[in-house]
């Protein structure tokens, strides 16, 4: 709570309105070094002032990335992760689940952004992610920040996913539906035992 309250006070004191993106306001700030979506009830997009001098296409990709996080309601999932990690800090599987949840949110966000900006801009978007990787991400699990950049193997996996188009077969849905039906029927069915007098 202290980390989030402290960060939001610093952001409110040091921000300048840039534009409106759909239902979300975009601000520039010197507090953060990487673009992010931040806020609980009315999240806003923050761009570092140093990045406003970048090419217009790159800035639009940053804004689109954060707006997609807003559309996916990832800021709500971030709040839930913070609450769970705060309560069950001693449970190693929860930390693993929280990490995987963040990673999946980023991969899904990247895929959606590419569908918005077009396949021709796939590699430009990957280059923007790599450029953002040198900037630190504040808070990680303790601040409710949906930041654009990640480092290390996570970034490597995202770049690999961006550079390799996925082709999903329609036949995969049939075994998936059969599997889900089997699990539901086996776990939700009840056995009735008849006792004869």
Image (cartoon, rainbow, N blue to C red):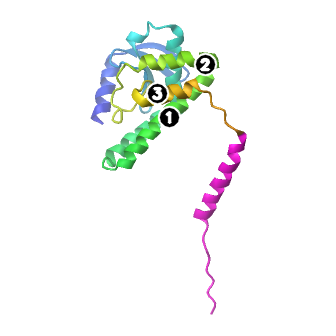
> What residue is disc 2 on?
117
Residue 80 has which mark?
none
**Which secondary structure class fits the magenta region best?**
helix
Looking at the rendering, the stretch of residues picked out in magenta corresponds to 170-197
- Measuring 43% from the left and 24% from the top, which residue is drawn there? 149
- Measuring 32% from the left and 44% from the top, which residue is drawn there? 86
* Left or right position of 3 against 161: left
> What residue is disc 1 on?
105
Q: What whole-number distance in Å separates the C-alpha atoms at marks 2 and 3?
A: 21 Å
Q: What whole-number distance in Å separates the C-alpha atoms at marks 2 and 1?
A: 18 Å
Using the rendered view, name the quadrant where residue 114 is placed. Answer: top right
Residues at discs 2 and 1 in contact (Cβ within 8 Å): no
Point out the tag, 2 or 3, that comes first from the N-terminus. Answer: 2
How far from the left and from the top, in percent, is residue 43?
A: 45, 28
What quarter of the picture does the C terminus occupy? bottom right
> What residue is disc 3 on?
156
* Label 2 environment density (alpha carbons within 10 Å; few <14, some 14–19, many ≥20): some
């Amino acid at each position: 709570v202290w980390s989030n309250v402290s960060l939001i006070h610093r952001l409110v004191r040091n921000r300048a309105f840039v534009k409106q993106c759909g239902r979300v306001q975009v601000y520039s700030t010197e507090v953060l070094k990487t673009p992010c979506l931040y806020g609980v009830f009315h999240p806003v997009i923050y761009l570092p002032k140093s990045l406003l001098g970048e090419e217009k296409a790159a800035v639009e990709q940053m804004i689109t990335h954060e707006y997609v996080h807003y559309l996916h309601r990832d800021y709500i999932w971030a709040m839930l992760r913070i609450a769970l990690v705060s309560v069950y800090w001693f449970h190693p599987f929860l930390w693993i689940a929280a990490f995987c949840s963040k990673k999946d949110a980023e991969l899904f966000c990247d895929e959606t952004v590419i569908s918005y900006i077009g396949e021709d801009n796939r590699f430009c978007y990957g280059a923007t992610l790599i450029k953002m990787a040198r900037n630190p991400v504040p808070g990680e699990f303790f601040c409710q920040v949906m930041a654009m950049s990640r480092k290390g193997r996570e970034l490597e996996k995202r770049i690999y996913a961006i550079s390799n188009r996925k082709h999903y077969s329609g036949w995969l849905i049939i075994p998936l539906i059969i599997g889900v039906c089997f699990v539901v029927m086996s776990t939700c069915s009840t056995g009735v035992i008849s006792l004869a007098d």
